């Protein structure tokens, strides 16, 4: 099956986070028929990572994730592009990696493993579980796939997810002097945060803040006793530096609740590839036992997670050749 055809077949299967089972089964059947050894690594009652390889156990592995963000968007195509959920994030990458790995085996007899994880879009639960797999000790190089426009990423920002929570005192809105608005506190903190330049890094760039959620209050005529805001901060420095900076901004007006964090990470560069530094976070920080990490994949992150997500067929074909080139280069190291 050509890489574009395989991409479409993968995209026909709904694998939004938590619903990866049918896609994992399809890939397993596809690889089993081609003679791969398979291992389903259970992550939850309904979710499993797919791990596939040919013997001898390889020391180079391709990896990406099975899940997509909602909603499921059925694929369509024209002469140049494939449209729909997962086109570039990351079913086109799965198809490119499988096609490249098959080609490397058929033409060079170079075994390259495949590691496809669940829940990358939410908690990276699949990657955290994969990091405990015994095959990790055989891996020297892990080539992770995300939409980098087929450029080799030599660094990726980290992500700090947190909540800012404020408490006040409920009261009648006609008598604000007898209450204390938690919403006012949250807004004051957020304004101060947006007006503060957080630490940056010459390699990774600026630390950026996205206020993704704000909630609070009881009714229009009630002074809000509670409020909270959810933030995603793209890290360019260690989290400790940013947390301390935010605490100095909050100054006791609210409290912080840290939800999750992945630190910024530098990745293995290779000569002969166009390079970039990406702002998004991947599974790589949770796959530390899987050798030295690289990051590259077809498609643009600016199209991912949108209603118009797409991938060009030419870029998919180019990705197959790039994954081949990377594996052959790493095999010589």
Image: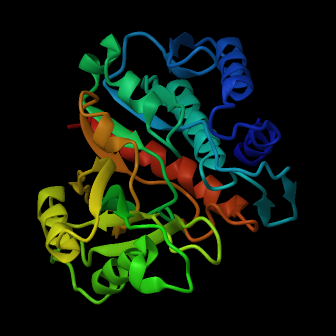
- Of the 4 image quadrants, the one containing the C terminus is top left
Closer to us: 51 or 244: 244
Would you identify the image quadrant in which residue 19 lies? top right
The percent coordinates of residue 315 (x first, y second) are 62, 61
The percent coordinates of residue 151 (x first, y second) are 42, 64
Would you identify the image quadrant in which residue 77 lies? bottom right
Vertical order, 56 against 198 (above or below): above
Report the number of discs: 0
Q: In this view, does 17 lie to the left or right of 210?
A: right
Vertical order, 9 against 168 (above or below): above
Closer to us: 95 or 50: 50
Vertical order, 294 against 108 (above or below): below
The percent coordinates of residue 25 (x first, y second) are 70, 19
- Of the 4 image quadrants, the one containing the N terminus is top right
Q: Which colour scheme is used?
A: rainbow
Residue 219 visible from this viewpoint = yes
Residue 156 visible from this viewpoint = no
Closer to us: 143 or 274: 143
Q: In this view, does 112 lie to the left or right of 15?
A: left
Would you identify the image quadrant in which residue 15 lies? top right
**Residue at image location 36% in from the left, 76% down from the top:** 185
Q: Is residue 263 left or right of residue 296?
A: left
**Residue at image location 34% in from the left, 42% down from the top:** 284
**Residue at image location 50% in from the left, 70% down from the top:** 224
The percent coordinates of residue 30 (x first, y second) are 71, 21
**Residue at image location 37% in from the left, 68% down from the top:** 274
């Amino acid at each position: 099956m050509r890489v574009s055809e395989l991409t479409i077949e993968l995209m026909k299967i709904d694998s939004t986070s938590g619903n990866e089972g049918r896609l994992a089964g399809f890939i397993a059947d596809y690889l089993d028929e081609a003679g791969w050894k398979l291992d389903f690594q259970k992550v939850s009652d309904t979710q499993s990572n797919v791990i596939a390889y040919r013997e001898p156990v390889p020391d180079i592995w391709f990896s990406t994730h099975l899940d997509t963000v909602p909603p499921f968007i059925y694929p369509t195509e024209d002469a140049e592009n494939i449209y729909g959920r997962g086109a570039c994030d990351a079913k086109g990458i799965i198809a490119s990696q499988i096609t490249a790995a098959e080609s490397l085996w058929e033409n060079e007899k170079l075994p390259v493993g495949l590691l496809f994880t669940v829940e990358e879009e939410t908690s990276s639960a699949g990657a955290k579980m994969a990091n405990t797999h015994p095959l990790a000790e055989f891996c020297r190089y892990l080539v992770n796939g995300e939409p980098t426009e087929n450029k080799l990423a030599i660094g990726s920002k980290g992500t700090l997810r947190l909540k800012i929570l404020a408490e006040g005192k409920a009261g009648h809105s006609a008598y604000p002097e007898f209450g204390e608005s938690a919403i006012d506190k949250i807004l004051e903190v957020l304004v101060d945060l947006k007006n503060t330049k957080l630490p940056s890094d010459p390699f990774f760039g600026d630390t950026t803040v996205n206020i993704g959620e704000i909630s609070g209050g009881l009714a229009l005529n009630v002074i809000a006793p509670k409020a909270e805001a959810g933030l995603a901060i793209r890290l360019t420095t260690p989290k400790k530096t940013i947390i301390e900076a935010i605490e100095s901004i909050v100054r006791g007006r609210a409290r912080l609740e840290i939800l999750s964090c992945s630190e910024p990470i530098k990745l293995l560069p290779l000569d002969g590839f166009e390079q970039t530094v990406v702002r998004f976070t991947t599974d790589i920080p949770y796959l530390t036992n899987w050798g030295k990490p690289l990051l590259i994949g077809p498609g643009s992150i600016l199209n991912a997670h949108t209603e118009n997500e797409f991938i060009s067929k030419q870029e998919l074909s180019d990705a197959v050749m790039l994954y081949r080139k990377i594996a052959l280069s790493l095999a010589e190291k």
